[in-house]
Amino acid sequence: MFDQSFATLEEMVVATAEMVRPTERLTVSQAASKYRYLDNPGSYVGYWPNEKTPYLVEPMDVLTSHEFNEMIFVGPARTGKSDMFFNWLTYTAKCDPADMLFVGMTKDVSRDWSLGDLAKAIRHTKALGEKLLPGRKNDNVHDKFFTNGMRLLIKWPTITELSGKTVPRVWLADYDRMEDDIAKEGPPFDLAKKRTQTYKRFAMAAAESSPGRPVLDAKWVRKTPHEAPPTKGILSLYNRGDRRRWYWRCLQCRDAFEPHFGLFSYPSSSDFMEAAEAVTLVCPHCGYPHLPEHKKDLQELNHNARWIKDGQVWLPNGKIEGKPRRTEGASFYLRGPAAAFQDWQSLVFNYLNAMDAYERTGDETQLKKTITADQGDPYTPKAMEGGRLPEDLKNRAQNWGGTKDNPIVPPEVRFLIATIDVQAGKRPSFVVHVYGISERGDVYHIDMFKIRESERLDDDGKPLPLNPATHGEDWKVLIKNVIEKSYPLAGNPNMRMSIKLTGCDSGGEAGVTTNALNFWRSLRDDKEGRSYHMRFRLLKGEPKKDTPRVRLGYPDAERRDRNSGARGDVPMLFINSNQVKDLASGMLDRKDAGEISDISVFGMVHFPHWAEDWLYSQLTTEIRTAKGWENPNSKRNEAFDLLYYCLALIIYHPINIERLDWSDPPGWAAEWDQNDLVFKDGDKLPFSSTTVTYDLEALARDLA
């Protein structure tokens, strides 16, 4: 195994003794401060100083934990994160021998690292150098053998180098500069970790990197406080771990917070250096402006900081409470302001310069570099940005009572509108949203649900799956589940409000339009005379610039063949989707309720406290471009469509909200004690057996 000759028996005994020497009981950080020597004249000369980078202590000590078999560290440049490997190597060689595998970005990078940084560490750290066996076979570019029997392999991410090897300890450096998929067999980390599997709880696979992969979804909504945006690479590994973040304590209020670039405050100035020199970091709790010198004083911020796991809270009294995530990986994410070798002025100056370059040239290269390498944040390409963020909407959610399973009507609502989207796919469904409209023109999300079961039964009497495209009879579920649906009133659950008008998209996969038209006809020809067809509108978007905002039409009015689903006898609302989506977007951007005035009858959009994250994501999927509203990432957007359907319905007859006289409203828009659509729970629906009539003269004016 070793290429070494011994001059005497004593030398052989000493060398053999190294292989059986008991483990020295130190942590990696303790071994580093005791044995790792750095010789960087002009910067630092001496043994490794844990107090300089206190945020590296816990990640290093996890490397020898039997509780975890993964350690992931995400951080910007100039944090010292790459030195963790040399400290781990020193610990392994001196205290606890075990084979190690180092994986660099490429073969050339690994070679240069071996001849440069590794050789320097071995040369200056006596405890490491004296363990290295001499001889070309024992000490070469890609293999290092030590007197205690351990071996260090220096490789790169190819399927050949990450297969067929069994080692207990693996380190992948600068992970986000590696390929995501090695020979179509998986990510490099998972392939490397496979090499450690034999050692079970004694195994450890570690990776470090700044976040170099772009954000995949600009409209992502954080599900937990420490979740990172969706990306490939190192942040994907971080998200599957226990998600630890580095928290400081405010020097004034003593509350804990995570320092990041977004907390910087600096003046607006054409002199970027002047702006950078005035930077402070503002406490998100009390607004106290921390100065750059507070970070430089280790006793102030970094020294008294802590790693906090996702699910935990660091209280002002020093206690940590909460239930942390339980995983097999310990993952750490440090942001730019806390980096020991990076000053705040440089962070701001680099960012301002990069933004200036982008605004002048449109080139994002410099901006991406400073956000990922300096700030330690993943980069969102400008093409993916646009409009509001899901979290902006979620932060405005209100508690007006009720729950997801028992929604209620808030006091401001005068009438209800339901809109339906026909969803295809493996599990076809009707997606239904119910909205409340207030006197001020505000829109309240009252309810949202899916209908997936038909009224057809299988041989066991169980409902068969819904399929609106192939089974026309499946549309009948909308009568009971939507048209006749009602909701309890806030503060008076014995009284309920029924839905004024329902709108349904008429498009979709083959068969949907024909069945939608036939369903409307069945409502018109209802034998009980309920006139539900007057409470049900078919809708169709048309984004042409020269079309009216909303118009009534009769599809294929010239076609009379009996096999055609459209015969010109079914009214349909055609919506200029770009214009009405512009209106919906403006309402979503509003943060204050509407005012009763002659200028505008539309206010803001309200969300219930129980709404789930998908609602906010779907409302922010589309962006406005020169071509109109587009869905660049082909994400789910039903909520945005259903909202603009709602606005189209209240713009047109019979609602006509822009002409509605709230001082003398129709009965269906009156206050609750006089509202025609409010009834006592258990009583008959207000419109279930009566014919609904409208002012034909007003309708004629609308159609003109």
Image (cartoon, helix red, strand yellow):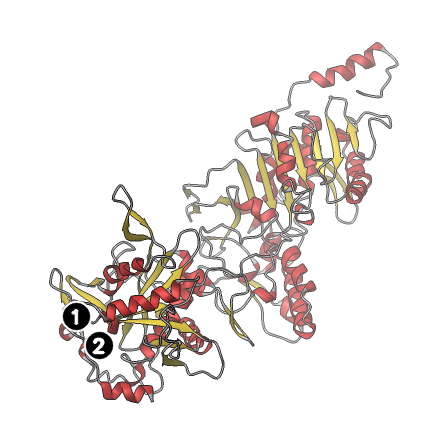
Left or right of 242? Residue 591 is left
Give the image location of residue 188, x and y in percent. Answer: 65, 41
Q: Can residue 417 be seen in this view?
A: no
Left or right of 314? Residue 274 is right
Q: Is mark 1 on a helix, strand or loop?
A: loop
Give the image location of residue 5, x and y in percent. Answer: 87, 17
Q: What element carries label 2?
A: helix
Residue beneath label 1, please? 529
Residue beneath label 2, please? 669
Q: Which badge, 2 or 1, is on the more N-terminal residue?
A: 1
Q: What residue type is labelled 2?
A: Ala
Asked whether the residues under the numbered discs 2 and 1 touch, taking CB atoms below 8 Å apart as contact, a structural biologist would say no
Q: Is residue 346 above or below residue 81?
A: below
Toward the viewer: 434 or 587? 434
Toward the viewer: 647 or 277? 647
Give the image location of residue 235, x and y in percent. Answer: 58, 49
Left or right of 225? Residue 498 is left
Q: What is the quadrant of the C terminus in the image?
A: bottom left
Q: How far apart are marks 2 and 1 (CA)?
A: 24 Å
Toward the viewer: 401 or 662? 662
Q: Which amino acid does label 1 sit on?
A: Gly
